[in-house]
Image: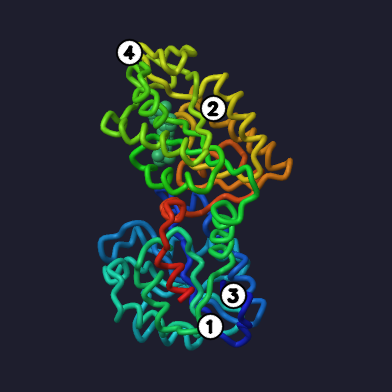
Amino acid sequence: MTTINNFNFDGKKALIRVDFNVPLDENFNVTDATRIESAKPTILKILEDGGSCVLMSHLGRPNGVSPEFSLQHIVESVSEIIGVQVKFMNDCVGDEVEKSVEELQAGEILLLENLRFYKEEKNGDVAFAEQLSKLGDIYVNDAFGTAHRAHASTTIIAQFFTDKKCFGLLLAKEIESIDKVLNNSEKPVLAILGGAKVSSKITVIENILDKVDHLILGGGMTFTFVKAQGGNVGDSICEDDKMELALEILKQAKAKNVTVHIPVDVIAADDFSNTANTKILDVTQIPDGWQGLDAGPKSIAIFDEVVNKCKTILWNGPLGVFEMESFANGTIALGHSIDNATKNGAFSLVGGGDSVAAVKQFGFADKVSYVSTGGGAMLEMLEGKTLPGIEAINN
Ligand code: AMP
């Protein structure tokens, strides 16, 4: 794997695709700077070598040029986090931008305007990618969050850099961490898949069955499995059209010697509300009018035991509706179990949208081995797909 550590950037201009698609409040202040902080090591190494950085990113989903999606809003945050006053260009291609890049001195950083102000970015337009490619000597991709997209700045651009292209430190770490779980794992290997629906995780489950010894299935998808096996799930979220598939997955797991653990009890509620009446019920005996919204105490204890006997742990998706305090306990307990297993030497990787939000919210982010920065990208890697942004550097 070629990373920035394979290059000396002295006197060079690095054109870095970063993922600065950060959340902003109504006054355009950055409310979560994790993605900027994650890019810092790559930027600093290049500056320390004696190089300069041209940063390109998207922000949100603009329809053409729209000021509310300008990357100008984040200039001060980036400057503060990196510790260098960042220059800004109100476009990302063209003569003016090329001139600014030309004038950029060693140690300086130039942030370009939102790539998605041009529809050519998402379309993977070759001419647009070629224009971008004029803005640096070495292309660095450090944007895991968009590595599954064949966009101009994430994939197409790489063809203009032949051997002058590499991964940034963040993207390299993401690739290494997932590889550590899927291909170079210490056994026993455990995957915990939660979240709302089976349908969004099917391909992940199928691919992962070849890689793991234990599989914990929790969250809303529990009930499709339970109902398929004849249980009563009441008003719990359930995909009836996926019941056959659920049985097929269980069959495949058995054939592949994977032990599947599904919650045995739940915190059931009489309404999808934080203030609903609740009771602990056997997962197969939920009456109509009640729905399972979190894992129950017996399940938590069983999961704790499984987690603590495994040496490699992958966690994607919460065990309950953690956004409501009344149904966050299962997800928090699982976080504690993984924290404990990690302290005892297990490698733990958390990734995929909502579980990242959960580990951050409950303070586990620095207690697990690695928290992935890419939701969709991570899921696609877990599905066994080759991501275009990664392939473009490797080829
Ligand atoms: P996903 O994006 O598929 O990982 O799903 C995450 C969402 O699943 C979160 O917003 C949770 O609130 C939701 N979720 C987890 N458990 C349940 C459940 N038992 N019933 C309904 N939604 C759930």
Callout 4: helix, strand or loop?
A: loop
Q: Percent x, y for residue 353?
A: 45, 46
Instruction: State the residue in front, 310 or 333.
Output: 310
Q: Residue at x 48, y 19 (%)?
A: 266
Instruction: State the residue in front, 102 or 367.
Output: 367
Quarter-of-image position of residue 92 = bottom left
Instruction: State the residue in front, 322 or 73.
Output: 322
Residue to which mark 1 is pinned = 13
Q: Amino acid at mark 3?
A: Ile
Q: Do residues under tags 4 and 2 come within 8 Å of each other at their CB atoms?
A: no
Quadrant location of the C terminus?
A: bottom left
Residue to which mark 2 is pinned = 330
Question: Which comes sooner in the sequence, label 3 or label 1?
Answer: 3
Q: Do residues under tags 1 and 2 come within 8 Å of each other at their CB atoms?
A: no
Q: Do residues under tags 2 and 3 come within 8 Å of each other at their CB atoms?
A: no
Mark sitting on residue 38: none
Report the Cα–Cα distance between label 2 and label 3.
40 Å
Please state if 185 lies on the left or on the right of 62 as rendered. Answer: right
Q: Residue at x 33, y 66 (%)?
A: 116
Query: Ligand 1 shows up in which quadrant of the image?
Result: top left
Q: Which of labels 1 and 2 is toward the front? A: 2
Callout 1: helix, strand or loop?
A: strand
Q: Amino acid at mark 2?
A: Gly
Please state if 267 lies on the left or on the right of 91 as rendered. Answer: right
Quarter-of-image position of residue 173 = bottom right
Cβ(mark 3) to ligand 1 < 8 Å? no
Callout 2: helix, strand or loop?
A: helix
Q: Amino acid at mark 4?
A: Gly
